[in-house]
Image (spheres, rainbow, N blue to C red):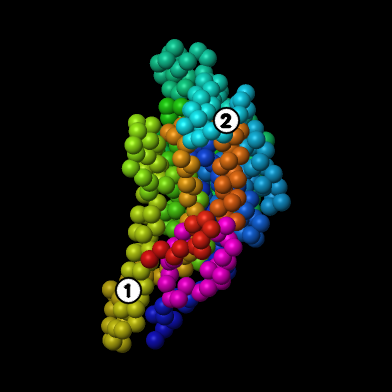
Amino acid sequence: MTDDYVSAPSRTPAQAQRVLVLQGGGALGSYQAGAFQALCHSGFEPEWIAGISIGAVNAAIIAGNEAEQRVDRLKEFWQMVSAPVPWKPAASGDRHRSLFNETSAALIATFGVPGFFTPRVPPAPLWPQGSPQSQSYYDTSPLKRTLERLVDFDRINDLKCRLSVGAVGVTSGNFRYFDNVEFKRQGKRIEAEHIMASGALPPGFPSIVIDGEHYWDGGISSNTPLDYVLEAETDRDLLIFQVDLFSARGPLPLTLFEAAEREKDIRFSSRTRMNTDKNRQIHNARKAVRDLLDKLPDHLKDDPSAKFLREAAKENTVTVVHLIYKSKNYETNSKDYDFSHVAMVEHWESGVRDVHSSMRHREWLERPQSGETMVTYDLSGDESPVKKE
Protein backbone atom coordinates (compact mmCIF):
# COMPACT_ATOMS: atom_id res chain seq x y z
CA MET A 1 0.00 0.00 0.00
CA THR A 2 1.41 3.44 -0.95
CA ASP A 3 1.36 6.55 1.22
CA ASP A 4 -1.31 8.00 -1.10
CA TYR A 5 -3.85 5.62 0.42
CA VAL A 6 -3.08 6.42 4.05
CA SER A 7 -5.71 8.54 5.77
CA ALA A 8 -4.60 11.92 7.06
CA PRO A 9 -3.05 11.51 10.53
CA SER A 10 -4.54 13.15 13.60
CA ARG A 11 -2.89 16.50 14.08
CA THR A 12 -2.69 19.10 16.81
CA PRO A 13 -4.63 22.28 15.92
CA ALA A 14 -2.07 24.50 17.67
CA GLN A 15 0.54 23.47 15.09
CA ALA A 16 -1.56 24.49 12.04
CA GLN A 17 -1.43 27.67 9.98
CA ARG A 18 -3.36 30.32 11.92
CA VAL A 19 -6.10 32.19 10.10
CA LEU A 20 -8.37 35.00 11.30
CA VAL A 21 -11.72 35.31 9.48
CA LEU A 22 -13.70 38.54 10.02
CA GLN A 23 -17.30 39.10 8.98
CA GLY A 24 -18.78 42.46 7.98
CA GLY A 25 -20.95 44.43 10.39
CA GLY A 26 -20.21 48.17 10.39
CA ALA A 27 -20.02 49.67 13.86
CA LEU A 28 -20.08 46.20 15.41
CA GLY A 29 -16.53 45.74 14.08
CA SER A 30 -15.03 47.00 17.33
CA TYR A 31 -16.09 43.64 18.77
CA GLN A 32 -13.61 42.00 16.38
CA ALA A 33 -10.91 44.41 17.50
CA GLY A 34 -11.52 43.51 21.15
CA ALA A 35 -11.55 39.81 20.30
CA PHE A 36 -8.24 40.20 18.46
CA GLN A 37 -6.70 41.97 21.46
CA ALA A 38 -7.71 39.04 23.67
CA LEU A 39 -6.41 36.51 21.13
CA CYS A 40 -3.06 38.31 21.15
CA HIS A 41 -2.91 37.91 24.93
CA SER A 42 -3.47 34.19 24.36
CA GLY A 43 -0.54 33.97 21.96
CA PHE A 44 -2.57 33.78 18.74
CA GLU A 45 -0.74 35.56 15.92
CA PRO A 46 -2.44 35.10 12.53
CA GLU A 47 -0.48 34.22 9.42
CA TRP A 48 -3.50 34.94 7.21
CA ILE A 49 -6.43 37.33 7.67
CA ALA A 50 -9.56 37.31 5.51
CA GLY A 51 -12.27 39.93 5.87
CA ILE A 52 -15.42 41.43 4.42
CA SER A 53 -16.56 45.06 4.79
CA ILE A 54 -15.57 46.36 8.26
CA GLY A 55 -13.83 43.01 8.71
CA ALA A 56 -11.65 43.99 5.73
CA VAL A 57 -10.77 47.29 7.41
CA ASN A 58 -9.80 45.54 10.65
CA ALA A 59 -7.90 42.92 8.63
CA ALA A 60 -5.92 45.57 6.75
CA ILE A 61 -4.96 47.36 9.97
CA ILE A 62 -3.79 44.08 11.51
CA ALA A 63 -1.92 42.81 8.44
CA GLY A 64 -0.49 46.25 7.69
CA ASN A 65 1.30 46.70 11.02
CA GLU A 66 3.97 44.95 13.06
CA ALA A 67 2.63 42.59 15.72
CA GLU A 68 3.41 44.94 18.62
CA GLN A 69 1.58 47.86 16.93
CA ARG A 70 -1.61 46.15 15.81
CA VAL A 71 -3.80 46.63 18.88
CA ASP A 72 -2.72 50.27 19.23
CA ARG A 73 -3.58 50.94 15.58
CA LEU A 74 -6.97 49.29 16.00
CA LYS A 75 -7.61 51.43 19.08
CA GLU A 76 -6.60 54.54 17.17
CA PHE A 77 -8.97 53.71 14.34
CA TRP A 78 -11.96 52.90 16.54
CA GLN A 79 -11.39 55.90 18.82
CA MET A 80 -11.33 58.13 15.74
CA VAL A 81 -14.46 56.76 14.06
CA SER A 82 -16.56 56.52 17.23
CA ALA A 83 -18.55 59.72 17.43
CA PRO A 84 -18.93 61.44 20.80
CA VAL A 85 -22.55 61.98 21.88
CA PRO A 86 -23.26 65.06 24.05
CA TRP A 87 -25.00 63.00 26.75
CA LYS A 88 -24.69 59.60 28.38
CA PRO A 89 -27.36 56.89 28.29
CA ALA A 90 -29.66 56.69 31.28
CA ALA A 91 -29.09 53.60 33.40
CA SER A 92 -32.79 52.90 33.80
CA GLY A 93 -33.55 49.97 31.54
CA ASP A 94 -33.40 48.60 28.03
CA ARG A 95 -36.08 50.91 26.69
CA HIS A 96 -34.20 54.08 27.57
CA ARG A 97 -30.97 52.62 26.23
CA SER A 98 -32.67 51.71 22.94
CA LEU A 99 -33.83 55.30 22.62
CA PHE A 100 -30.28 56.51 23.24
CA ASN A 101 -28.92 54.13 20.60
CA GLU A 102 -31.50 55.18 18.01
CA THR A 103 -30.83 58.86 18.69
CA SER A 104 -27.05 58.52 18.43
CA ALA A 105 -27.39 56.47 15.23
CA ALA A 106 -29.65 59.17 13.74
CA LEU A 107 -27.06 61.84 14.55
CA ILE A 108 -24.33 59.74 12.93
CA ALA A 109 -26.49 59.19 9.84
CA THR A 110 -26.98 62.95 9.64
CA PHE A 111 -23.45 64.19 10.27
CA GLY A 112 -21.25 61.21 9.33
CA VAL A 113 -18.27 59.66 11.12
CA PRO A 114 -14.85 61.34 11.49
CA GLY A 115 -12.16 59.69 9.39
CA PHE A 116 -14.71 57.42 7.73
CA PHE A 117 -17.54 59.07 5.80
CA THR A 118 -19.24 62.44 5.44
CA PRO A 119 -22.70 63.30 4.03
CA ARG A 120 -22.80 64.68 0.53
CA VAL A 121 -23.60 68.39 0.18
CA PRO A 122 -25.83 68.88 -1.70
CA PRO A 123 -27.50 65.48 -1.16
CA ALA A 124 -27.16 62.75 -3.78
CA PRO A 125 -30.56 63.33 -5.49
CA LEU A 126 -29.52 66.90 -6.37
CA TRP A 127 -26.41 65.85 -8.31
CA PRO A 128 -26.58 65.24 -12.08
CA GLN A 129 -27.67 61.72 -13.02
CA GLY A 130 -24.69 59.48 -13.70
CA SER A 131 -22.24 61.50 -11.63
CA PRO A 132 -20.39 59.62 -8.85
CA GLN A 133 -21.98 61.91 -6.27
CA SER A 134 -25.51 60.97 -7.37
CA GLN A 135 -25.15 57.30 -6.43
CA SER A 136 -24.49 57.37 -2.70
CA TYR A 137 -25.47 59.37 0.36
CA TYR A 138 -21.95 59.64 1.72
CA ASP A 139 -18.42 60.44 0.58
CA THR A 140 -15.85 57.88 1.80
CA SER A 141 -12.69 59.74 0.80
CA PRO A 142 -11.91 60.30 4.54
CA LEU A 143 -11.59 56.51 4.88
CA LYS A 144 -8.94 56.43 2.15
CA ARG A 145 -6.82 58.95 4.04
CA THR A 146 -7.35 57.04 7.29
CA LEU A 147 -6.27 53.71 5.76
CA GLU A 148 -3.21 55.26 4.14
CA ARG A 149 -2.18 56.69 7.51
CA LEU A 150 -2.82 53.62 9.67
CA VAL A 151 -1.89 50.80 7.26
CA ASP A 152 1.55 50.04 5.86
CA PHE A 153 0.58 48.74 2.42
CA ASP A 154 4.22 48.00 1.61
CA ARG A 155 4.17 45.50 4.47
CA ILE A 156 1.01 43.91 3.09
CA ASN A 157 2.45 43.66 -0.41
CA ASP A 158 5.71 42.22 0.92
CA LEU A 159 3.58 39.29 2.15
CA LYS A 160 4.48 39.68 5.82
CA CYS A 161 0.95 38.42 6.45
CA ARG A 162 -1.53 37.04 3.93
CA LEU A 163 -4.54 39.31 3.41
CA SER A 164 -7.74 38.50 1.50
CA VAL A 165 -10.70 40.89 1.23
CA GLY A 166 -13.90 40.28 -0.73
CA ALA A 167 -16.03 42.57 -2.92
CA VAL A 168 -18.73 42.11 -5.57
CA GLY A 169 -18.76 43.56 -9.09
CA VAL A 170 -21.60 46.04 -9.58
CA THR A 171 -22.24 45.19 -13.24
CA SER A 172 -21.08 41.57 -13.31
CA GLY A 173 -22.52 40.50 -9.98
CA ASN A 174 -19.45 38.29 -9.54
CA PHE A 175 -17.74 37.95 -6.18
CA ARG A 176 -14.01 38.61 -6.17
CA TYR A 177 -11.30 38.37 -3.54
CA PHE A 178 -8.35 40.73 -3.53
CA ASP A 179 -5.55 38.53 -2.16
CA ASN A 180 -2.01 39.83 -1.68
CA VAL A 181 -0.51 36.40 -2.43
CA GLU A 182 -2.38 36.14 -5.74
CA PHE A 183 -1.67 39.79 -6.54
CA LYS A 184 2.05 39.22 -5.98
CA ARG A 185 2.01 36.48 -8.60
CA GLN A 186 0.26 38.85 -11.00
CA GLY A 187 2.58 41.79 -10.33
CA LYS A 188 -0.21 43.81 -8.65
CA ARG A 189 -0.51 45.58 -5.30
CA ILE A 190 -3.15 45.75 -2.60
CA GLU A 191 -3.99 49.41 -1.94
CA ALA A 192 -6.52 51.36 0.12
CA GLU A 193 -9.04 51.16 -2.74
CA HIS A 194 -9.28 47.37 -2.41
CA ILE A 195 -10.18 47.68 1.27
CA MET A 196 -12.70 50.43 0.52
CA ALA A 197 -14.29 48.30 -2.23
CA SER A 198 -14.90 45.51 0.27
CA GLY A 199 -16.81 47.97 2.48
CA ALA A 200 -18.66 50.02 -0.14
CA LEU A 201 -22.19 49.19 1.03
CA PRO A 202 -24.80 50.87 -1.21
CA PRO A 203 -26.64 53.17 -1.28
CA GLY A 204 -24.77 54.69 1.63
CA PHE A 205 -21.29 54.39 0.16
CA PRO A 206 -20.14 54.82 -3.46
CA SER A 207 -18.77 51.98 -5.56
CA ILE A 208 -14.99 51.81 -5.91
CA VAL A 209 -13.42 51.43 -9.36
CA ILE A 210 -10.62 48.85 -9.65
CA ASP A 211 -9.20 47.81 -13.02
CA GLY A 212 -12.16 49.44 -14.76
CA GLU A 213 -14.78 47.53 -12.73
CA HIS A 214 -17.03 49.07 -10.09
CA TYR A 215 -17.18 47.16 -6.81
CA TRP A 216 -19.55 47.15 -3.86
CA ASP A 217 -19.42 45.66 -0.36
CA GLY A 218 -18.76 41.92 -0.44
CA GLY A 219 -21.45 41.41 2.21
CA ILE A 220 -24.09 41.87 -0.49
CA SER A 221 -23.13 38.46 -1.85
CA SER A 222 -21.46 36.71 1.08
CA ASN A 223 -20.62 38.28 4.41
CA THR A 224 -18.31 35.52 5.64
CA PRO A 225 -15.01 34.67 3.87
CA LEU A 226 -14.68 31.17 5.33
CA ASP A 227 -15.47 29.44 2.03
CA TYR A 228 -12.68 31.33 0.27
CA VAL A 229 -10.12 30.33 2.88
CA LEU A 230 -11.08 26.67 2.67
CA GLU A 231 -10.99 26.69 -1.13
CA ALA A 232 -7.74 28.65 -1.40
CA GLU A 233 -5.71 26.43 0.97
CA THR A 234 -6.03 22.66 0.70
CA ASP A 235 -2.47 21.60 1.54
CA ARG A 236 -1.49 23.17 4.87
CA ASP A 237 -3.46 22.39 8.02
CA LEU A 238 -5.54 25.34 9.23
CA LEU A 239 -6.58 26.69 12.62
CA ILE A 240 -9.27 29.27 11.83
CA PHE A 241 -10.68 31.79 14.30
CA GLN A 242 -13.90 33.08 12.78
CA VAL A 243 -15.37 36.20 14.41
CA ASP A 244 -18.90 36.97 13.19
CA LEU A 245 -20.99 40.02 14.00
CA PHE A 246 -24.48 38.77 13.12
CA SER A 247 -26.11 35.65 14.49
CA ALA A 248 -28.22 33.43 12.24
CA ARG A 249 -30.13 32.25 15.28
CA GLY A 250 -32.34 34.46 17.40
CA PRO A 251 -35.71 34.84 19.11
CA LEU A 252 -39.01 35.51 17.37
CA PRO A 253 -39.41 39.31 17.05
CA LEU A 254 -42.26 40.95 18.92
CA THR A 255 -42.13 44.48 17.46
CA LEU A 256 -41.47 46.19 14.13
CA PHE A 257 -38.01 47.27 15.27
CA GLU A 258 -37.17 43.75 16.41
CA ALA A 259 -38.37 42.38 13.07
CA ALA A 260 -36.05 44.78 11.21
CA GLU A 261 -33.12 43.76 13.40
CA ARG A 262 -33.87 40.04 12.99
CA GLU A 263 -34.06 40.40 9.20
CA LYS A 264 -30.67 42.09 9.14
CA ASP A 265 -29.15 39.40 11.36
CA ILE A 266 -30.36 36.66 9.04
CA ARG A 267 -29.32 38.51 5.88
CA PHE A 268 -25.77 39.31 6.98
CA SER A 269 -25.02 36.15 8.93
CA SER A 270 -24.61 34.60 5.44
CA ARG A 271 -25.73 31.21 6.73
CA THR A 272 -22.42 30.77 8.53
CA ARG A 273 -23.50 27.60 10.33
CA MET A 274 -24.75 26.09 7.08
CA ASN A 275 -21.41 26.86 5.43
CA THR A 276 -19.39 25.22 8.19
CA ASP A 277 -21.69 22.20 8.19
CA LYS A 278 -21.42 21.92 4.41
CA ASN A 279 -17.64 22.04 4.50
CA ARG A 280 -17.53 19.45 7.29
CA GLN A 281 -19.67 17.17 5.13
CA ILE A 282 -17.26 17.63 2.23
CA HIS A 283 -14.30 16.78 4.45
CA ASN A 284 -16.09 13.73 5.84
CA ALA A 285 -16.95 12.60 2.31
CA ARG A 286 -13.30 12.82 1.28
CA LYS A 287 -12.28 10.81 4.32
CA ALA A 288 -14.89 8.17 3.40
CA VAL A 289 -13.45 8.02 -0.13
CA ARG A 290 -9.94 7.50 1.26
CA ASP A 291 -11.19 4.76 3.57
CA LEU A 292 -12.90 3.05 0.65
CA LEU A 293 -9.77 3.30 -1.50
CA ASP A 294 -7.84 1.58 1.29
CA LYS A 295 -10.15 -1.42 0.93
CA LEU A 296 -9.85 -1.81 -2.84
CA PRO A 297 -8.21 -5.00 -4.08
CA ASP A 298 -4.74 -4.50 -5.52
CA HIS A 299 -5.83 -4.95 -9.14
CA LEU A 300 -8.18 -1.91 -8.87
CA LYS A 301 -5.84 0.51 -7.15
CA ASP A 302 -4.28 1.62 -10.43
CA ASP A 303 -7.63 2.03 -12.17
CA PRO A 304 -7.95 5.56 -13.67
CA SER A 305 -11.11 6.20 -11.66
CA ALA A 306 -9.37 5.18 -8.44
CA LYS A 307 -6.43 7.45 -9.25
CA PHE A 308 -8.81 10.35 -9.92
CA LEU A 309 -10.66 9.81 -6.64
CA ARG A 310 -7.39 9.44 -4.74
CA GLU A 311 -6.27 12.86 -5.96
CA ALA A 312 -9.67 14.46 -5.29
CA ALA A 313 -9.77 13.03 -1.75
CA LYS A 314 -6.52 14.63 -0.63
CA GLU A 315 -7.11 17.32 1.97
CA ASN A 316 -5.74 19.23 4.90
CA THR A 317 -6.91 19.18 8.51
CA VAL A 318 -9.10 22.14 9.52
CA THR A 319 -10.16 23.38 12.96
CA VAL A 320 -12.70 26.23 12.98
CA VAL A 321 -13.16 28.12 16.23
CA HIS A 322 -16.34 30.17 15.87
CA LEU A 323 -17.14 33.28 17.92
CA ILE A 324 -20.37 35.22 17.27
CA TYR A 325 -21.31 38.58 18.75
CA LYS A 326 -24.54 38.32 20.72
CA SER A 327 -26.68 41.45 20.64
CA LYS A 328 -27.79 43.13 23.82
CA ASN A 329 -31.52 43.33 24.55
CA TYR A 330 -31.52 47.09 23.95
CA GLU A 331 -29.80 46.95 20.54
CA THR A 332 -31.97 47.54 17.50
CA ASN A 333 -31.74 47.64 13.71
CA SER A 334 -29.31 50.58 13.95
CA LYS A 335 -26.65 48.61 15.83
CA ASP A 336 -24.38 48.34 12.77
CA TYR A 337 -24.30 52.10 12.16
CA ASP A 338 -24.36 53.31 15.75
CA PHE A 339 -20.77 54.55 15.84
CA SER A 340 -21.21 56.24 19.21
CA HIS A 341 -18.25 56.03 21.55
CA VAL A 342 -20.43 54.31 24.15
CA ALA A 343 -21.38 51.53 21.74
CA MET A 344 -17.81 51.16 20.46
CA VAL A 345 -16.43 50.64 23.97
CA GLU A 346 -19.18 48.14 24.82
CA HIS A 347 -18.55 46.08 21.69
CA TRP A 348 -14.78 46.12 22.18
CA GLU A 349 -15.08 45.02 25.80
CA SER A 350 -17.53 42.28 24.80
CA GLY A 351 -14.98 40.90 22.34
CA VAL A 352 -12.25 40.90 24.97
CA ARG A 353 -14.50 39.30 27.57
CA ASP A 354 -15.88 36.59 25.28
CA VAL A 355 -12.45 35.44 24.12
CA HIS A 356 -10.87 35.57 27.58
CA SER A 357 -13.77 33.56 29.02
CA SER A 358 -13.56 30.92 26.33
CA MET A 359 -9.77 30.69 26.25
CA ARG A 360 -9.69 29.55 29.86
CA HIS A 361 -10.19 26.11 28.35
CA ARG A 362 -7.12 25.70 26.13
CA GLU A 363 -6.86 21.93 26.15
CA TRP A 364 -8.94 21.69 22.98
CA LEU A 365 -6.14 23.46 21.08
CA GLU A 366 -3.70 20.75 22.09
CA ARG A 367 -5.86 17.68 21.43
CA PRO A 368 -5.38 15.75 18.20
CA GLN A 369 -8.51 15.60 16.08
CA SER A 370 -9.12 11.85 16.56
CA GLY A 371 -8.95 11.09 12.86
CA GLU A 372 -11.39 13.82 11.83
CA THR A 373 -10.24 16.23 9.15
CA MET A 374 -12.54 19.17 9.98
CA VAL A 375 -13.75 20.10 13.44
CA THR A 376 -15.81 23.15 14.44
CA TYR A 377 -16.00 24.58 17.96
CA ASP A 378 -18.36 27.28 19.21
CA LEU A 379 -16.89 29.66 21.74
CA SER A 380 -19.67 30.14 24.25
CA GLY A 381 -18.66 32.60 26.90
CA ASP A 382 -18.00 31.13 30.32
CA GLU A 383 -18.49 27.54 29.15
CA SER A 384 -15.90 25.31 27.56
CA PRO A 385 -15.85 25.54 23.73
CA VAL A 386 -18.56 23.28 22.31
CA LYS A 387 -17.58 20.88 19.53
CA LYS A 388 -20.19 20.87 16.78
CA GLU A 389 -21.22 17.43 15.59
Residue 70 seen from this side: yes
Q: Residue at x 59, y 63 (%)?
A: 360
Residue 171 seen from this side: no
Dot 2: within a 10 Å radius of its alpha carbon, few (fewer than 14), some, or many (20 or more) residues?
Answer: some
Q: Quadrant of the N terminus?
A: bottom left
Residues 304 and 204: in front is: 204
Residue 146 part of the magenta-drawn span: no
| Residue range corresponding to the magenta coloring | 357-378
In the image, which disc is placed on residue 89? 2
Q: Residue at x 35, y 76 (%)?
A: 290
Badge 1 amino acid: Val
Q: Position of residue 248 (x, y in %)?
A: 38, 47
Residues 370 and 131: in front is: 370
Q: Residue at x 36, y 69 (%)?
A: 284
Q: Quadrant of the C terminus?
A: bottom left
Residues 195 and 21: in front is: 21
| Element under disc 1 | helix
For residue 76, side relative to residue 194 (left or right): right
